[in-house]
Amino acid sequence: MQFDEHGLLPVVAQDHVTGEIRMVAFANERAVQLTLETGRATFWSRSRGELWEKGRTSGNGLPVTAVLADCDADCLIYVVAPEGPTCHTGRPSCFYRRVRLEDGQPRLADEDAPAAVPLARLARAVADGPDDRVTAAAADVLSTVIGALRSRGLGVEHVLRELDRRAGTSGDDEKRSRDAAG
């Protein structure tokens, strides 16, 4: 791995289910080693000058399912299974603030950024939520899909016909038939 002149590299924590970026921090070699040994996201606190395991005091830990390096090995992704909100504000992700261009300069806007895309919310609801939350997230996804179909002059019946056509065919076989035809 390629650590900077301070012995650090940036680490992105990404939700293993939704793909949502939960936070970015820095790690030194020892933090990466501890993360790999313990399976818990460990970083180097630049402000405190010490190692810290995310969630050790708050309970909102980040169990790590994989550690990935970029092509230059100067940045890592900790693929995580969050145990509660990641941000100290109580939000799921630290990335909730929208940036806008004002008078030619990037500025923090007053409003929060939109929530995760509906599919990411559906994945999180299925993984973590009660049935009513799964149902609400599925309704969000279907609403988006129906809107997209309508924008093309298509209806749900087109999708249902396609599903009927695929009945009894494995996903791999169906994909191969599309690849062969196209």
Image (cartoon, rainbow, N blue to C red):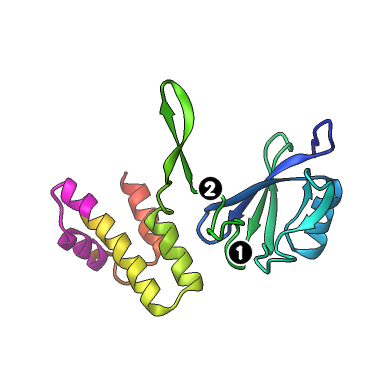
Image spot of residue 59 (x, y percent)? 68, 69
Q: Left or right of 154: which side holds 142?
A: right
Q: Left or right of 95: which side holds 182?
A: left
How far apart are the two marked residues, 1 and 2, measured between alpha carbons?
Answer: 15 Å
For label 2, the residue is 95
Q: Quadrant of residue 69?
A: top right
Q: What secondary structure is the magenta-colored segment mainly? A: helix
Q: Quadrant of residue 9?
A: top right
Image spot of residue 91 (x, y percent)? 53, 58
Position of the N terminus, as image quadrant, is top right
Check residue 82 in the rendering and tell me which mark sits there, or answer none.
1
Q: Left or right of 30: which side holds 151?
A: left
Task: Identify the residue at image location x=84%, y=54%.
Answer: 33
The amino acid pointed to by label 2 is Phe
Q: In the displayed orientation, state which residue is furthest to the left.
A: 153
Image spot of residue 135 (x, y percent)? 34, 73
Neighbours of disc 2 within 10 Å: few (<14), some (14-19), many (20+): some
Q: Is residue 156 part of the magenta span, yes or no?
A: yes
Between label 1 and label 2, give the one nearer the viewer.
Answer: 2
Task: Identify the residue at image location x=71%, y=34%.
Answer: 72
Q: Is residue 105 above or below residue 77?
A: above
Task: Identify the residue at image location x=39%, y=72%.
Answer: 134
Which span is picked out in magenta? 147-164
Task: Identify the residue at image location x=36%, y=59%.
Answer: 174
Q: Work out whether mark 1 precedes mark 2 in sequence or the reverse, and give the earlier one.
A: 1
